[in-house]
Image: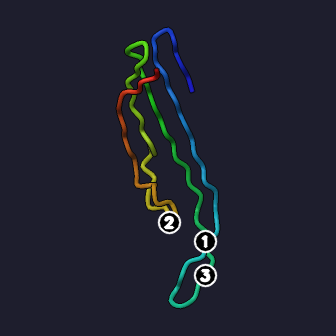
Amino acid sequence: NWDIQAIGTGLNVTANYTGKRLVEMQVGRTYEVTSIDPFATLDLSISKKITRYGRLFIRIHNLFDKKDVYDEYNLDGTKIFGGFDINL
């Protein structure tokens, strides 16, 4: 996290890594243990203070568009959010 107070701007970069793991998958009537490759994602957010209590922000989750990971149901590619935060 970087907060540049002189210009009221914040920057946050988050790296996420999930290593190789084993899962049990059904193949016909039996189950087999197989491995799933590791993967990494990068998230980025930028905010700008516009009032004493409020900031505008934009967040980009999964910047490099990772998707189709077997056991990650919430990893659907890049998502972009924007809004206004109020801190009272």
Instruction: Say the numbered circle drawn on residue 23.
Output: 1
Q: How many residues crowd around disc 2 within 10 Å: few (fewer than 14), some, or many (20 or more)? A: few
Q: Secondary structure at mark 3?
A: strand
x then y, percent, for residue 51: 39, 14
In the rendering, at what x and y percent does residue 87 appear? 46, 23
Q: CA distance from mark 2 to mark 3?
A: 15 Å
Going 52% across and 64% down the picture, which residue do you hit? 71
Considering the numbered disc 1 on the image, is that residue within a helix, a strand or a loop?
Answer: strand
Looking at the image, tell me whether mark 2 or mark 3 is earlier in sequence order: 3
Quarter of the figure with residue 58: top left
Q: Residue sitting at 60 percent across and 54 percent down?
A: 18
Tag count in the figure? 3
Q: Between residues 67 and 85, which one lies in front from this camera angle?
A: 85
Q: Mark 1: which amino acid? A: Val
Instruction: Please tell me which of labels 2 and 1 falls first in the chain.
Output: 1
Q: Secondary structure at mark 2?
A: loop
Q: Earlier in the sequence, mark 1 or mark 3?
A: 1
Q: Amino acid at mark 2?
A: Tyr
Along the viewing direction, whichever of 84 and 68 lies nearer the viewer: 84
Q: Residue furthest front?
A: 88
Q: Check disc 3 and report the residue beneath it.
A: 32
Q: Callout 3: 10 Å neighbours few (<14), some, many (20+)?
A: few
Contact between marks 2 and 1 (CB within 8 A): the answer is yes
Could you give the CA–CA distance between mark 1 and mark 3, rounded to whole angstroms?
8 Å
* Drawn side of residue 10 relative to residue 81, left or right: right
Badge 1, how many Cα within 10 Å: few under 14, some, many 20+? few
Q: For residue 70, which numbered disc appears in the image?
A: 2
Q: Residue at position x 39%, y 47% from top?
A: 78
The quarter of the picture where the N terminus appears is: top right
